[in-house]
């Protein structure tokens, strides 16, 4: 990468600092693209008692989707991040080993893909700890990342995740191309207004429905969610996000969320290849794992002016 594509001291939005901006002092690529895969497979179907047909739709992810994705990533030399529920990780060890053999990051995503808005706090702690231990048992170290199943969090979930020692969390949407520090203890009331808590060490890697394969492609019962989109429409959205971030967010991060049982279908894999081609054609774009990007970003924010 040429030095023109390395960004130093880029301004980051930080509502806690004077003037609203903070600047990491480390060098970051012009734009980092993180391809992330939520390897849900049958974890939530087992919990819900889904029908054989629904389970088979989910099984496609581990049987066909993941191997296809891993082959594509290997052929392009692209590292990625896999959020794997504990049930998937332990039920399909060959898939877990293939992810690790490819040099990809393994991160947590619940055990049976639980909805954390509906899980009591004690149970929440147990699930988080059980997931982190399952990852540690195969990688040898605690996982850096957590993504809430369904991107669903209860009122205590962020504090639970922060207390478990994760470097980053990836379920919130308050920014797009820039990580930020998670606030803990926000209080909102229709009578007393909103009081914001203090920033924690936990880093948020923001996500977006538009940058998730699932709502575009998977049919849903809700009105307005037809699914089965043409890949050309999704490619247009993702590519415009890519170009905008490349121009307007130097040093930034574009996080794409995908599911092997969804993106793994042929016409969608062809779209993913075209998206990778589009990103590779832009000067200074790199693909990386979230743990590495967040570590570099986090080191920068600590060594520079410290976030409030
Ligand atoms: Zn998921």
Image (spheres, grey):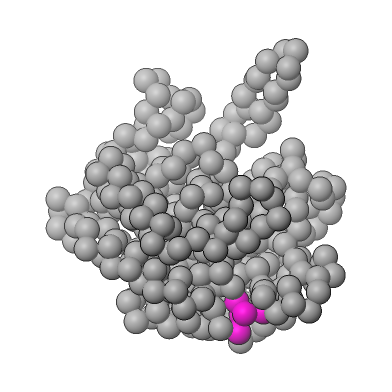
Image location of residue 85, percent across then percent down: 68, 67
Q: Which residues are magenta?
A: 59-63
| Tally of marks | 0
Against 280, residue 243 (above or below) is above
Q: Is residue 75 left or right of residue 179?
A: left
Q: Which residue is drawn at the image coordinates 70% and 65% (left, top)?
A: 131
**In terms of secondary structure, what is the magenta stretch mainly?**
helix
Can residue 286 be seen by looking at this rendering? yes
Query: Where, by quadrant of the figure, is residue 47 drawn?
Result: bottom right
Q: Nearer the viewer, residue 276 or 5?
A: 276
Specify whether residue 103 is painted magenta.
no
Image location of residue 123, percent across then percent down: 84, 54
The quadrant the N terminus occupies is: bottom left
Q: Which residue is drawn at the image coordinates 46% and 78% (left, top)?
A: 266
Q: Is residue 73 left or right of residue 119?
A: left
Against 208, residue 304 (above or below) is above
């Amino acid at each position: 990468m040429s030095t023109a594509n390395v960004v130093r001291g880029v301004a980051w939005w930080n509502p806690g600092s004077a003037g609203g901006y903070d600047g990491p002092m480390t060098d970051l690529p012009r734009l980092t693209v993180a391809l992330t895969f939520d390897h849900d497979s049958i974890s939530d179907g087992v919990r819900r008692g889904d029908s054989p047909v629904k389970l088979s739709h989910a099984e496609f992810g581990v049987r066909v989707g993941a191997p296809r994705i891993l082959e594509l990533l290997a052929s392009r030399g692209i590292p990625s991040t896999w959020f794997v529920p504990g049930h998937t990780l332990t039920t399909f060890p060959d898939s877990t080993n293939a992810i690790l053999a490819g040099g990809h990051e393994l991160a947590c995503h619940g055990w049976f893909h639980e909805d954390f808005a509906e899980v009591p706090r004690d149970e929440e702690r147990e699930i988080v700890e059980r997931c982190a231990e399952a990852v540690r048992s195969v990688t040898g170290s605690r996982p850096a990342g957590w993504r809430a199943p369904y991107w669903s969090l209860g009122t205590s979930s962020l504090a639970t995740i922060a207390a478990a020692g994760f470097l980053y969390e990836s379920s919130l949407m308050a920014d797009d191309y820039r990580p930020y520090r998670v606030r803990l203890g926000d209080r909102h009331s229709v009578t007393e207004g909103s009081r914001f808590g203090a920033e924690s060490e936990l880093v948020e890697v923001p996500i977006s429905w538009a940058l998730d394969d699932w709502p575009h492609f998977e049919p849903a019962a809700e009105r307005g969610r037809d699914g089965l989109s043409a890949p050309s429409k999704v490619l247009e959205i993702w590519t415009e996000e890519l170009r905008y971030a490349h121009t307007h967010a130097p040093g930034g991060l574009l996080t794409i969320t995908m599911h092997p049982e969804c993106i793994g279908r042929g016409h969608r894999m062809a779209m993913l290849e075209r998206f990778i081609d589009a990103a590779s054609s832009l000067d200074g774009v790199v693909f990386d794992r979230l743990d590495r990007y967040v570590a570099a970003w986090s080191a920068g924010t600590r060594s520079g002016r410290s976030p409030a």
